[in-house]
């Protein structure tokens, strides 16, 4: 082979330099073209929390479909890709790898599960892909502050601290116990309980831990009854929360039980036989899709029924609000859509009111949690009722 000479060599060097300089630009615009932005989600579509993941992602899709039908945002249509993680960490890692590296997702939204998000985020954030409004209220979704992490509402930690403060001060509870998942999700709840008890100069009276897939809680319930707890804080989602409540009631124990946002679901309230009657849950927003007379809420519920053939649940409400806030951030980012402009677009959102009457949502460069307020609700007559009209804090 003859060596390159003169202007041939110069052309080759210029071409190589151009290629090298182009790499950062391509990376910075992952999943973005002049006409499209790719957004991905990994969540539970067929596992133990499918009633949350499926309905939540349905609402994200419904909002994005509406955005596309209206012409897109700043000239771009949204390509939305959802992968099933079955509420398992290995499947979440696999799904995220596909979404980021094969599909080229610009951001990930509504990712399901605390341990799943915690496992995926280090590599995800290192690649400049924002994690937006995951389907978990864990503190790690927005703490420590990272410009690519955004949480929508109050954390499980916030919720149980506020609820426990209420029960100690207003109801005189003195022997508090926890029955929680032995996961990152469950630990966020037990940490909140222990920290609030410490603030009230109290200690935890008893605790049990379980796997997300456990189904028999009879022994755990009996153990807590022996401790004589007067309040049990449950660190479960839907299925395990119902099974814990059922196990407690089956032994004739009418102790007060409080959950958090993951157990605040219509399925929990409508368990046959009134098993969950009197069960309390903290929640960052109220489930109003079935009862509201507000035209916007009624339109949301009607559209959801038309699109998916069923009633929207609480997770669907969360997805609807999250998707609309994300769409606003994309609009605020302007035509030149990059990770930095998206973050700036999100941080520009102030005093956002959703259609469901939720606490006001605001962000800033030093605050990536939309709201930290929570409501206390109780199951009465197979429906959730608000105990305190004003949101609680601690």
Image (tube, rainbow, N blue to C red):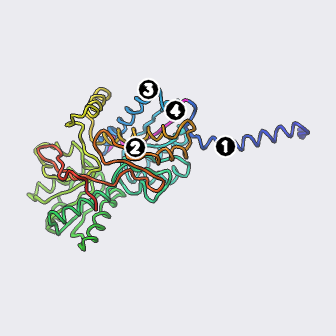
- Mark identifier at residue 110: 2
Which numbered disc covers residue 74?
4
Closer to us: 7 or 322: 322
**Given this view, does label 1 or label 4 mark the residue nearer the observer?**
4
Q: Nearer the viewer, mark 2 or mark 4?
A: 4
| 236, above or below 339, in the image | below
Residue 296 seen: yes
Near mark 4 (Cα within 10 A), the count class, few <14, some 14-19 or many ≥20, is some
Q: Residue beneath label 1, please?
A: 23
Question: In 3D space, how far apart are the residues under numbered discs 2 and 3 (Cα atoms)?
Answer: 23 Å
Q: CA distance from mark 3 to mark 4?
A: 11 Å
| Label 1: element kind | helix
Q: Secondary structure at mark 2?
A: loop
- CA distance separating discs 1 and 2: 29 Å
**Is residue 154 magenta-colored?**
no
What residue is disc 3 on?
70
Q: Is residue 271 above or below residue 259?
A: above
Q: Earlier in the sequence, mark 2 or mark 3?
A: 3
Horizontal arrangement in the rendering, residue 168 relative to residue 83 (left or right): left
The x and y percentages for residue 78 are 48, 32
Across and down, in percent, residue 340 comes to: 55, 46
Question: On residue 363, which mark appears?
Answer: none
Whichever of callouts 3 and 1 sits on the residue coming sooner in the sequence is: 1
Q: Which residue is at the far front?
A: 351
Q: Nearer the viewer, mark 3 or mark 1?
A: 3
Disc 4 is placed on an element classified as loop
Q: CA distance from mark 2 to mark 4?
A: 22 Å
Residue 394 in the figure: left or right of residue 61: left
Q: Quadrant of the C terminus?
A: bottom left
Which stretch appears magenta? 35-48
């Amino acid at each position: 082979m003859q060596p390159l000479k003169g202007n041939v060599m110069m052309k080759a060097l210029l071409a190589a330099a151009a290629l090298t300089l182009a790499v950062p630009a391509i990376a910075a615009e992952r999943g973005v073209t002049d006409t499209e932005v790719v957004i991905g989600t990994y969540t539970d579509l067929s596992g133990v929390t499918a009633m949350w993941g499926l309905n939540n992602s349905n609402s994200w899709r419904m909002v994005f479909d509406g955005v596309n039908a209206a012409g897109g945002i700043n000239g771009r249509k949204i390509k939305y890709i959802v992968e099933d993680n079955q509420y398992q960490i290995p499947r979440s890692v696999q799904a995220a790898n596909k979404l980021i590296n094969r599909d080229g997702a610009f951001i990930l939204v509504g990712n399901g599960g605390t341990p799943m998000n915690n496992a995926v985020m280090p590599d995800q954030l290192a690649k400049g892909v924002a994690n937006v409004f995951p389907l978990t209220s864990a503190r790690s979704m927005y703490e420590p502050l990272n410009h690519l992490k955004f949480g929508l509402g109050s954390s499980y930690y916030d919720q149980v601290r506020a609820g426990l403060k209420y029960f100690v001060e207003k109801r005189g509870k003195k022997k508090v116990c926890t029955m929680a998942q032995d996961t990152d999700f469950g630990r966020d709840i037990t940490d909140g309980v222990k920290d609030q008890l410490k603030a009230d100069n109290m200690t935890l009276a008893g605790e049990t831990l379980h796997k997300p897939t456990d189904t028999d809680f009879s022994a755990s319930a009996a153990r807590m009854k022996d401790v004589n707890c007067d309040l049990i804080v449950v660190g479960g989602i839907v299925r395990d929360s119902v099974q814990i409540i059922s196990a407690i009631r089956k032994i004739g124990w009418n102790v007060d039980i409080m959950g958090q946002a993951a157990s605040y679901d219509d399925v929990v309230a409508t368990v046959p036989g009134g098993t969950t009657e009197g069960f309390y849950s903290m929640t960052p927003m109220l489930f109003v899709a079935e009862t509201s007379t507000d035209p916007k809420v009624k339109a949301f519920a009607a559209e959801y029924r038309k699109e998916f053939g069923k009633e929207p649940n609480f997770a669907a409400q969360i997805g609807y609000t999250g998707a609309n806030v994300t769409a606003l951030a994309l609009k605020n980012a302007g035509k030149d859509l990059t990770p930095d402009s998206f973050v700036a677009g999100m941080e520009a959102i102030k005093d956002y009111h959703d259609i469901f009457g939720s606490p006001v949502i605001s962000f800033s460069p030093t605050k990536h949690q939309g709201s930290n307020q929570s409501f206390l609700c109780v199951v009465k007559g197979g429906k959730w009722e608000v105990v305190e009209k004003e949101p609680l804090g601690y």
